[in-house]
Image (cartoon, helix red, strand yellow):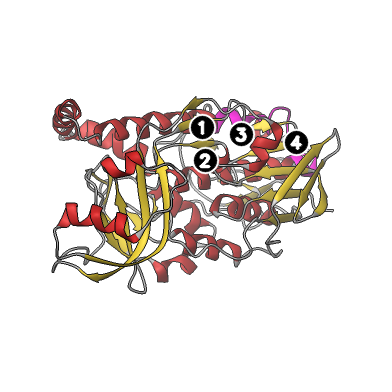
């Protein structure tokens, strides 16, 4: 019996499984689809996610698939300069989500169980029984990372408050039979208008379109090549001709978040916990950060070393971060509305973002580098993560009883670094207090 079952083999579920495995936890990942998802989906890794993936040795397998290093993010199409951010990676990586997922999955010890849709979940005080792919699987815990339409969330009846979508957009991977010279030759940041085009690998293009036709069609209406053609002609003129629609989806600006990320022995992460307008790759990056926050806390709980409240701190730390992203993406959605009043607001925002302090504040938020938690003093970007999921103590002797949970290292600046890379103590009094708070009582 695995210690933890993870539902969903997207980047969030796979990175959660990776974090658990490197901490010595047995994991089973189940996935509804029969094979890895080849679609491009999210296309950007923000600087904090790049830091995390590099620190875990996962970035090297992703880099061959990187199409661009963009020295800026964007806020509803406004470029936000990243070049002066305090990181070794002051840029976002333009890379298809499928390559990120594949790099993580390749490092898992266990194979993903595919063609195994979750159909039932039952839990008791000792564990969880999940029916997936027609078989019952028993585990101590369940991590639901099964996307914005989470089956686990529905089966548990978990409250998912927020608002429904008010606008409709289409995202598609397409081929082009013809296009104007100079259009979509390189990776660029999105603008606020319909008809955004980005070159992918193997002759494919990503497009996002929205207009009156998209607002009329229902969410379940198939996306046709003719529909995409009309939208791209309106945006780029008659010289552009659509070939095939390889993948397409309708989405909107729905904004919802679970009231609680923990339901007994079930924990939610990624889009299963929060949905919003998919702008700037925020969903992918938010889910990856959920995974690294949850992984070490759940591992400590499985091992029986977690202090009281540690697992619940996953909700306490991550819920406010996602709530802020929902505010940001809702604001960006309003700014993208083709309306004279929205245009007036865009003009004001343009002027505000020209102020260096305002631009830096938005850059810190979009990049993920501005994330912090109560009692945390920053990120330890110069302290590599332990290979076995332990915390790292730099510049001080590891007190008796904590060696199994703390790796000691030499260094001039004393620091206690949590397994997710955040500094829990940075010298002076309070080391044992921090050890007790985050790692439990000594053995």
| Marks 3,2: beta carbons within 8 A | no
- The residue shown at (42%, 41%) is 218
Question: Taking 433 as reference, is 117 above or below it?
Answer: below
| Distance between mark 1 and mark 2 Cα atoms | 7 Å
Q: Which residue is mark 1?
A: 376
Badge 3 crowding class, 10 Å Cα cut-off, few under 14, some 14 to 19, many 20 or more, is many
Between 163 and 77, the one lying in front of the other is: 163
Query: Is 337 in the magenta?
Result: no
Task: Say if residue 27 shows up in the picture.
Answer: yes
Between 163 and 237, the one lying in front of the other is: 237
| Marks 1,2: beta carbons within 8 A | yes
- The residue shown at (14%, 62%) is 238
Helix, strand or loop status at disc 4: loop
Helix, strand or loop status at disc 3: helix
Helix, strand or loop status at disc 1: loop
Badge number at residue 314: 3
Q: Sequence order check: which comes first, mark 3 or mark 2?
A: 3
Q: Nearer the viewer, mark 3 or mark 4?
A: 4
Badge number at residue 422: 2
> In this picture, which residue range is highlighted in magenta?
301-318
Q: Is residue 381 left or right of residue 260?
A: left
| Marks 4,2: beta carbons within 8 A | no
Q: Residue furthest bottom?
A: 202
Q: Which residue is mark 4?
A: 265
| Distance between mark 1 and mark 4 Cα atoms | 27 Å
| Distance between mark 4 and mark 2 Cα atoms | 25 Å
| Distance between mark 3 and mark 1 Cα atoms | 14 Å
When asked about the image quadrant of residue 43, the answer is bottom left
């Amino acid at each position: 019996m695995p210690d933890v079952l993870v539902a969903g083999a997207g980047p969030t579920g796979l990175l959660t499984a990776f974090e658990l495995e490197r901490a010595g936890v047995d994991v089973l990942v189940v996935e509804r689809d029969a094979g890895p998802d080849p679609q491009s989906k999210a296309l950007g890794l923000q600087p904090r996610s790049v830091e995390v993936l590099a620190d875990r040795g996962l970035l090297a397998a992703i880099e061959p698939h990187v199409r661009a290093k963009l020295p800026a993010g964007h806020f509803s199409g406004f470029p936000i300069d990243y070049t002066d951010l305090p990181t070794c990676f002051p840029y976002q990586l333009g890379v298809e989500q499928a390559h990120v997922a594949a790099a993580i999955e390749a490092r898992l010890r266990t194979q993903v169980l595919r063609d195994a849709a979750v159909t039932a979940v039952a839990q008791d005080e000792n564990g969880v029984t999940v029916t997936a792919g027609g078989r019952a699987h028993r585990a101590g815990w369940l991590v639901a990372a099964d996307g914005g339409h989470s089956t686990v969330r529905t089966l548990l009846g978990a409250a998912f408050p927020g608002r429904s979508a008010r606008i409709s957009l289409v995202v598609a991977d397409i081929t082009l039979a013809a296009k104007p010279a100079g259009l979509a030759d390189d990776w660029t940041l999105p603008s606020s208008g319909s008809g955004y085009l980005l070159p992918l690998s193997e002759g494919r293009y990503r497009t996002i379109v929205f207009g009156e036709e998209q607002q009329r069609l229902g969410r379940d209406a198939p996306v046709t090549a003719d529909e995409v053609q009309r939208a791209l002609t309106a945006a780029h003129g008659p010289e552009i001709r659509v070939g095939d629609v390889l993948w397409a989806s309708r989405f909107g600006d729905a904004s919802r978040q679970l009231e609680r990320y923990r339901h007994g022995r079930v924990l939610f992460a990624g889009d299963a916990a929060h949905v919003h307008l998919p702008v700037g790759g925020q969903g992918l990056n938010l889910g990856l950060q959920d995974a690294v926050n949850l992984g070490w806390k759940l591992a400590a709980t499985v091992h029986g070393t977690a202090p009281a409240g540690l697992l619940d701190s996953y909700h306490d730390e991550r819920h406010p971060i996602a709530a802020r992203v929902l505010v940001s993406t809702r604001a960006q959605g309003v700014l993208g509305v083709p309306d004279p009043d929205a245009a007036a607001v865009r003009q004001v925002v343009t002027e505000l973002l020209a102020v260096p302090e305002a631009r830096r504040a938005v850059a810190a938020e979009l990049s993920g580098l501005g994330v912090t938690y109560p009692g945390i003093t920053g990120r330890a970007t110069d302290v590599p993560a332990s290979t076995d999921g332990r915390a790292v103590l730099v510049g001080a002797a590891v007190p008796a009883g904590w060696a199994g949970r703390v790796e000691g290292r030499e260094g001039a600046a004393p620091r206690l670094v949590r397994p997710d890379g955040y500094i829990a103590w940075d010298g002076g009094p309070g080391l044992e207090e921090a050890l007790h708070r985050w790692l439990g009582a000594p053995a």
